[in-house]
Image (cartoon, rainbow, N blue to C red):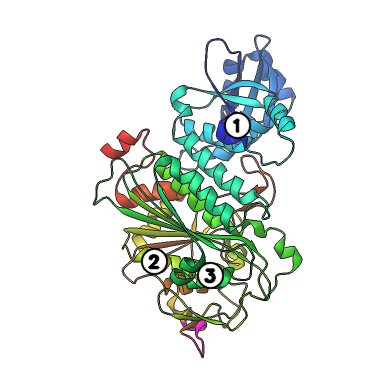
């Protein structure tokens, strides 16, 4: 897990040899000679370099030091630069070993370069540590200032890679107790008060979480954490985060096919994303009061496992019929959402790898956004676009609410119709949220099916950067300000 030790970054000093990457647009090709010299520009053209986005070529410099050229996207039709931090992840993968600086057009956000490089350097491996350390020494490093090393982009990278690490960890090494322990390890260094509930106390307080987890020998855990920023007074906005932490999902008695189980170690991706967001909020010392709740559980098959058509009374007092044991994520969330609402947060946000229907509709890169407040939804959508970390809103369409009727309970955990699965899941959760509570629900895939620059195959937490910016917009401050003091002033 080397990224959090920042081995991909090198603080600039006068003693280090530093090589240069020039990020260029195709429309600026005529000025290439002025930047790298006539010889290098000619060499680049002979190599077929056309500054296409993601095209990388090494050219001879005016000295013995190598020079690299990276193609980046043209400005959009409004003449604005196109943000693509992931494009700079290519450098961490394909440059030769050494210390590199990146020179970009003035309109490129410097933090995008740093973030993209760090995310591109990320690798998860359980191979021999000595071999891994040797391999890391042969990789390129990005030269940054000391201030940049402590800046927002690095905090974002550390937080995102925390989520990647947790999601990528094999399920035999990441059960409910291990996930709860990882949450404590991530949150306590920032001064958060972390409580882990299990056993009889969990069964009493979170009956549906307990019911999902009773089939596994690895008992469920609920993590509840509280934190307050150093600039947050008693009346500071209260942000409540809830994450689905199903460490492995077999489907229960409604067993998944083996092909669908292959990636089910990622079913705790919602909890991992919430931890990443919480860590980022604390690292940047946002002026908020923060509560975090994670439902850490395994959905297994055994003689004790929940059965189809079981009926369980939730923390909210609503009885729920188990129409399908593979729709367990919403059962894990609903007790936690109801408890979170008891303190009337100013914003309640949950993240879950909840439905395949959301992936059918939006694919792997676009988390689905559900929200009961149009103004809040707009702020989240805008923040996602501005941060090149997009979301896509789907409706909480009330016309489908009666699809979850049950003849014997207040509601079923599955729809009676095989359509609009992501929407009906959101409507189920909405039953456990107070009508006047501002609430955002995110249905995320939390996985990259293939490797791309900045996004290696495996676990991921899309949306985190957008959520972070949106929280500031909702509460009226600039979460992206350069320092916590600047955030307070804004």
Mark earlier in primary sequence (3, 2): 3
Confirm or deny contact between disc 3 and disc 2 (CB under 8 A). no
Q: Residues within 10 Å of mark 2 (few under 14, many from 20)?
A: some
Front residue of 18 and 335: 335
Residue at image point 35% right, 58% down: 347
Compared to 204, does 292 lie above or below? above
Q: Residues within 10 Å of mark 3 (few under 14, many from 20)?
A: many
Q: Say which residue label 1 marks.
A: 26
**Numbered disc in front, either 3 or 1:** 3
Q: Work out which quarter of the rendered image holds the N terminus and state it.
A: top right
**Numbered disc in front, either 3 or 2:** 3
Q: Say which residue label 3 marks.
A: 210
Could you tell me residue 473's position as x and y percent? Answer: 34, 49
Specify start and end residues of the magenta stretch as a single range: 402-409
Confirm or deny contact between disc 2 and disc 1 (CB under 8 A). no
Mark 3 to mark 2: distance in Å?
Answer: 15 Å
Q: Say which residue label 2 marks.
A: 339
Could you tell me residue 48's position as x and y percent? Answer: 73, 28
């Amino acid at each position: 897990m080397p990224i959090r030790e920042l081995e991909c970054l090198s603080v600039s000093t006068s003693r280090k040899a530093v090589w240069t990457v020039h990020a260029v647009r195709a429309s600026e090709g005529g000025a290439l000679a002025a930047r790298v010299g006539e010889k290098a520009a000619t060499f680049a053209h002979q190599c077929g370099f056309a500054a296409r986005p993601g095209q990388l070529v090494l050219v001879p410099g005016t000295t013995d030091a190598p020079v690299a050229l990276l193609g980046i996207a043209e400005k959009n039709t409004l003449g604005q630069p196109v943000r693509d931090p992931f494009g700079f992840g290519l450098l961490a993968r394909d440059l030769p070993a050494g210390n590199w600086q990146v020179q970009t057009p003035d309109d490129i956000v410097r933090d995008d370069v740093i973030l993209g490089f760090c995310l591109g350097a990320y690798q998860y491996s359980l191979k021999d540590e000595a071999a891994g350390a040797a391999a890391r020494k042969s990789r390129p490093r990005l030269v940054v200032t000391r201030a940049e090393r402590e800046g927002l982009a690095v905090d974002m990278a550390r937080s995102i890679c925390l989520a990647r690490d947790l999601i990528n960890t094999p399920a035999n090494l990441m059960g409910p107790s291990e996930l709860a322990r990882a949450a404590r390890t991530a949150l306590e260094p920032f001064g958060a008060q972390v409580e882990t509930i299990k056993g009889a106390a969990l069964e009493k307080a979170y009956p549906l979480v307990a019911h999902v987890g009773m089939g596994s020998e690895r008992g469920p855990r609920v993590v509840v954490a509280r934190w307050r920023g150093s600039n947050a007074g008693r009346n500071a906005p209260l942000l409540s985060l809830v994450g689905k932490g199903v460490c492995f999902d077999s489907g229960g008695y409604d067993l998944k096919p083996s092909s669908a189980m292959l990636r089910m170690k990622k079913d705790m991706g919602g909890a991992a994303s919430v931890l990443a967001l919480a860590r980022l909020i604390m690292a940047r010392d946002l002026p908020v009061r923060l509560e975090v709740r994670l439902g850490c559980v395994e959905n297994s098959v055994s003689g004790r496992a929940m059965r189809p058509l079981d009926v369980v009374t939730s923390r909210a007092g609503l009885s729920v019929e188990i129409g399908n044991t593979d729709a367990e994520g919403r059962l894990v969330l609903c007790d936690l959402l109801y408890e979170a609402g008891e303190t009337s947060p100013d914003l309640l946000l949950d993240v879950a790898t909840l439905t395949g229907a959301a992936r059918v509709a939006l694919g792997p890169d676009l988390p689905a956004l559900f929200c009961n407040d149009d103004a809040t939804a707009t702020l989240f959508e805008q923040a996602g676009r501005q941060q090149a970390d997009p979301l896509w809103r789907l409706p909480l369409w009330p016309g489908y609410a009666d699809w979850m009727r049950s003849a014997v309970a207040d509601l079923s955990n599955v729809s009676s119709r095989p359509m609009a699965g992501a929407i009906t899941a959101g409507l189920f959760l909405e039953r456990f949220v107070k009508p006047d509570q501002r609430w955002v629900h995110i249905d995320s895939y939390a996985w990259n099916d293939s490797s791309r620059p900045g996004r290696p195959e495996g676990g991921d937490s899309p949306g985190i950067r957008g959520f972070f910016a949106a929280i500031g917009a909702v509460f009226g401050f600039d979460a992206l300000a350069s320092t916590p003091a600047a955030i307070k002033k804004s």
